[in-house]
């Protein structure tokens, strides 16, 4: 069998969707955004986040998302790894959470077409409509657990 035929007959490798999340903390409060007009979890609260676009370090992707969604600049090197969540809902994903301890600029809703509001909430009293897997990741981050899972039957 030729190398070309052997390569063509191999199944495609499994691929995960990778996303990054930024935890903004102010004392005992977290910044959450209420999703809108996206078709995914609209009306529910989550963190500043987005897909990893490839060809960029994860911290750089998180800093990019903070700029795009919250209008602030973050030095990627200053982002602290918080936790990673392996989850499955409609598709299997790896979600990397980073804590921003400092940033430049004023936090603002830089994507009003996708976000109804940015608001601060007590860490120990998050809104009832916080996205379930985001809540799970926050609980694990607070407890110091660096890896967690969120599995839903599809």
Image (spheres, rainbow, N blue to C red):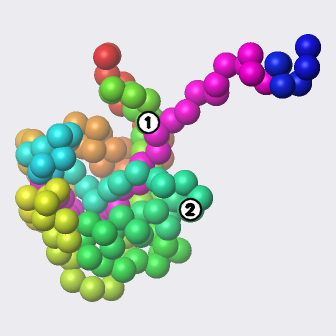
Kindly identify which residue carries mark 2. Answer: 56
Residue at image position (51%, 35%) is: 16
Q: Is residue 144 visible?
A: no
Q: What crowding class fits label 2: few (fewer than 14 Cα within 10 Å), some (14-19), or many (20 or more)? A: few
Q: Position of residue 145 (x, y in %)?
A: 44, 45
Q: Position of residue 57 (x, y in %)?
A: 57, 62
Q: Residue furthest right?
A: 1
Q: Position of residue 131 (x, y in %)?
A: 20, 41
> Quadrant of the rendered structure where residue 86 is?
top left
Q: Is residue 67 magenta?
A: no
Q: Is residue 12 magenta?
A: yes
Residue at image position (42%, 40%) is: 85
Horizontal arrangement in the rendering, residue 53 relative to residue 47 (left or right) = right
- Look at the numbered disc 2 and give the secondary structure of its residue: loop
Q: Is residue 35 visible?
A: yes
**Which residues make up the magenta segment?**
7-34
Specify the quadrant that holds the N terminus.
Answer: top right
Residue at image position (59%, 58%) is: 55
> Quadrant of the rendered structure where residue 50 is?
bottom left
Horizontal arrangement in the rendering, residue 14 relative to residue 114 (left or right) = right
């Amino acid at each position: 069998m030729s190398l070309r035929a052997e390569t063509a007959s191999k199944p495609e490798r499994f691929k995960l969707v990778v996303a990054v999340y930024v935890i903004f903390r102010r004392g005992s409060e977290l910044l959450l955004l209420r999703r809108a007009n996206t078709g995914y979890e609209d009306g529910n609260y989550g963190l500043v986040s987005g897909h990893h676009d490839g060809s960029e370090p994860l911290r750089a992707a998180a800093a990019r998302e903070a700029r795009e969604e919250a209008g602030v600049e973050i030095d990627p090197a200053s982002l602290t790894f918080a936790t990673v969540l392996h989850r499955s809902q409609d598709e299997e994903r790896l979600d990397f959470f980073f804590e921003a301890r400092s940033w430049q600029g004023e936090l603002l809703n830089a994507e009003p077409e996708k976000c109804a509001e940015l608001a601060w909430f007590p860490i120990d009293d998050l809104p009832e409509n916080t996205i379930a897997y985001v809540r799970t990741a926050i609980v694990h981050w607070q407890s110091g657990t660096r890896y967690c899972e969120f599995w839903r039957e599809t």
